[in-house]
Image (cartoon, helix red, strand yellow):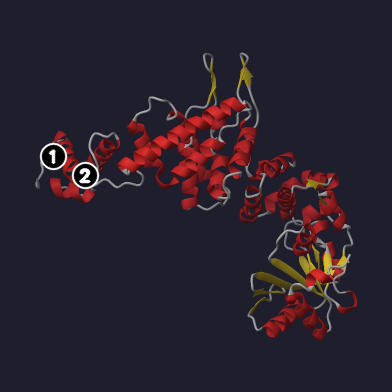
Amino acid sequence: MNFSEVLDKHSIFNVVAQSANDLGVDAYVIGGYVRDLILKRPSKDIDIVSIGSGIALAEAVAKKLGVHVNVYKNFGTAQLRVDDLDIEFVGARRESYRTESRKPIVEDGTLHDDQNRRDFTINAMGISLNADNYGELIDPFNGINDLRRKLIRTPLDPEITFSDDPLRMMRAVRFATQLNFDIEPDTFDGLVKTAERIDIISKERINDELNKIILSAVPSYGFKLLHQAGILKRIFPEFVELQGAEYQDGKGHKDNFYHTLQVLDNISKHTDDLWLRWAAIMHDIAKPATKRFDKKVGWTFHGHEDLGARFTPRIFRQMKLPMNENMRFVQKLVRLHLRPIALSKETISDSALRRLLFDAGADLEALMTLCRADITSKNPEKVKKHLSNFDKVEQKLYDLEARDQIRNFQPVITGEVIMEAFGLKPSAEVGVIKTAVREAILDGIIPNVFEPAYAFMLEEGQKMGLTPVVS
């Protein structure tokens, strides 16, 4: 199989070929770009392997193109950017591993050595950039056939491959999920047998792969593979604890593990926002801790939304996920995800709607997306009814917002106004009065207008025995 016509459409390959010829070295395109070329998937990352110094080849290419080259001598690699392409150069190498580390001992090697060290057959294919066989596919492990069969398979013994670099286990699942491929049986057995080796991988590297799984079209597939391989319980035990349906007195509850995966798939049809997808993953995370059996109503999970919100920072910290506004966004949606369900009743008050508007603020649309995804009934009429109710709630919220401008509102009575009115320093009394004013506005007792709000503030202060020094 020859790809010379395809290569000729991109001048960069010609420049690399000329530069390699000038240096008297062989060069090959290898890895993901070749895979995606065959799959007709867009790819902006090109890996070039030189049988010699990758850095020298990169510098020669950069000189011809007049572009800057970034050199990483410690790793023997160099990188340059041409238009929208990221091109990385490395010398062919062979690797050997120690059991306590995924960092290999690296030596210069042949193309065959370099292909042997690749994680999967579909990533070990190369295309020659050399004059005698320009464009020819070099595929020692029959990766082209695995692409046709939609299989993830390791080039060498899977147990050795995964034990040497356990991050490859996450990558196997990630590629299977992104490409909708199966993992070849022997390769999957290798995952199962070496699952505990994932413990030596940093949480950050694991998260990088896990987040790519979460951002795939059907992320539940990846989670099921991780679970079946015994990896998920090692990297995210709280999620595995959701599994199982218990029955008592003929009453059962749904399996929250598979329910959560369905919610994740549902929400993934409507958003590519990683953290909104994480909110779907976390929304019922505290159900195991709140599960109780009531003889009258059956199984309950009262307060799982509040406890789940309290769990969120701990789980994010354990997993080395960001402890910033992304975590707070997930935490907020976990805490609020049941609120719109309660608001779907016909008799709901404007006060309750105002409170949700205030609490959700700019994230109201994200919350409603999560709530819709949370409907996983197998009864289509039930799903239709719930979605219709959410439509009504959303319309009520938007109508109220248009009238009252509650979302992200700031009460006109600030702490400074309260302190000046009563001659107070920062204190608990100031906070109590400020909260009373805010609650009165949300309850519709007073508008968020200075004069009536100020009068209400004075009344609240006087109830507490405070005397205004400014009226």
Quadrant position of the C terminus in the picture? top left
Please name the residue that numbered disc 1 is placed on. 466
Q: How many marks?
A: 2
Q: Nearer the viewer, residue 304 or 272?
A: 272
Q: Residue at x 61, y 13 (%)?
A: 249
Residue 133 in picture, x, y percent from top left: 89, 74
Q: Nearer the viewer, residue 98 or 276?
A: 276
Judge from the rendering whether residue 331 lies leftward or rightward of residue 52; answer left or right. left
| Alpha carbons under labels 2 and 1: distance apart | 23 Å
Badge 2: how crowded within 10 Å, few (<14), some, or many (20+)? few
Place residue 252 in its image quadrant: top right
Q: Residue at x 20, y 41 (%)?
A: 453
Badge 1: how crowded within 10 Å, few (<14), some, or many (20+)? some
Amino acid tagged 1: Leu
Judge from the rendering whether residue 353 lies leftward or rightward of residue 16; answer left or right. left
Place residue 55 in its image quadrant: bottom right
Judge from the rendering whether residue 469 lies leftward or rightward of residue 330; answer left or right. left
Please name the residue that numbered disc 2 is placed on. 449
Q: Quick one: SS at disc 1? A: loop
Amino acid tagged 2: Val
Q: Nearer the viewer, residue 240 or 399?
A: 399
